[in-house]
Image (spheres, grey):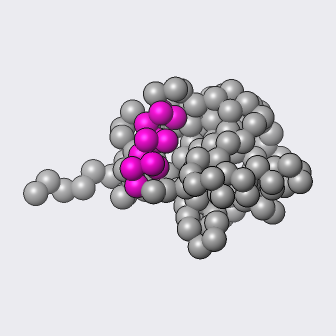
Amino acid sequence: MSPAVTRTCGSCTACCDGWLQIEVRGHKVGKGQPCPFSVAHQCAIYPERPQHPCREFICGWLVASSPLPDWMRPDQSSMIMLAANFLWRGLPVDVAVPVGEQPKKKALDWLTQFCAENKRLLVYQIGDEWFAFGPPLFQTDIASRLARGETPWGD
């Protein structure tokens, strides 16, 4: 049996490049605007980076048990996967956030097929629109949240 391979970010800095809505040391990071502490795709404050959101962030691709193939690293798939990001009726919901305007078609196709085969719920974004993948009741509930101006996760 071969030992488990631990994934590392490598040259990927998608989580710091402005695709996740975060705030770092009082600086809001907006869509497509990198963290002000990201300099030439390196964290200038890495040893002193804050607990939230930096140290607490869990990239779905990096998780040791991640089913995502190697080619689904966020900078290669144009998608950041947030596994089991929130619960819907007690069931975990995965969230896919685009790196850029939208995830690569190959990545989104793989993810929706994986979710269908494993009966996982998924919310993903293309441009400014959110989409729900799962049973009709889940899709309707997410659409209702969005129509009320809420986020898909309801906060």
Q: Position of residue 36 (x, y in %)?
A: 76, 39
| 43 to the left or right of 155 | left
Q: Position of residue 112 (x, y in %)?
A: 49, 41
Report the residue that reaches farthest toward the left. 1
Q: Residue at x 68, y 27 (%)?
A: 101
Q: Position of residue 88 (x, y in %)?
A: 64, 66
Residue 114 within the segment the image draws in magenta = yes
Q: Quadrant of residue 19?
A: top right
| 109 to the left or right of 126 | left
Q: In which quarter of the image is residue 48?
A: bottom right
Q: Which residue is drawn at 64% across and 29% down?
A: 102
| 83 to the left or right of 101 | left
Can residue 47 be seen? Answer: no
Report the residue that reaches farthest toward the right. 148
The residue lying toward the viewer, choosing from 40 and 149, is 149
The relative height of residue 51 versus residue 99 in the rendered view (above or below) is: below
The residue lying toward the viewer, choosing from 29 and 88, is 88
Can residue 109 be seen? Answer: yes
Residue 82 within the segment the image draws in magenta = no
Count of numbered circles on the image: 0
Magenta stretch secondary structure, dominant: helix
Report the residue that reaches farthest toward the front. 136
Q: Position of residue 134 (x, y in %)?
A: 56, 52
Q: Quadrant of the C terminus?
A: bottom right
Q: Residue at x 10, y 57 (%)?
A: 1
The residue lying toward the viewer, choosing from 106 and 148, is 148
Q: Which residue is drawn at 56% across and 68% down?
A: 91
| 62 to the left or right of 15 | left
Magenta-highlighted residues? 107-118
The relative height of residue 111 versus residue 67 in the rendered view (above or below) is: above
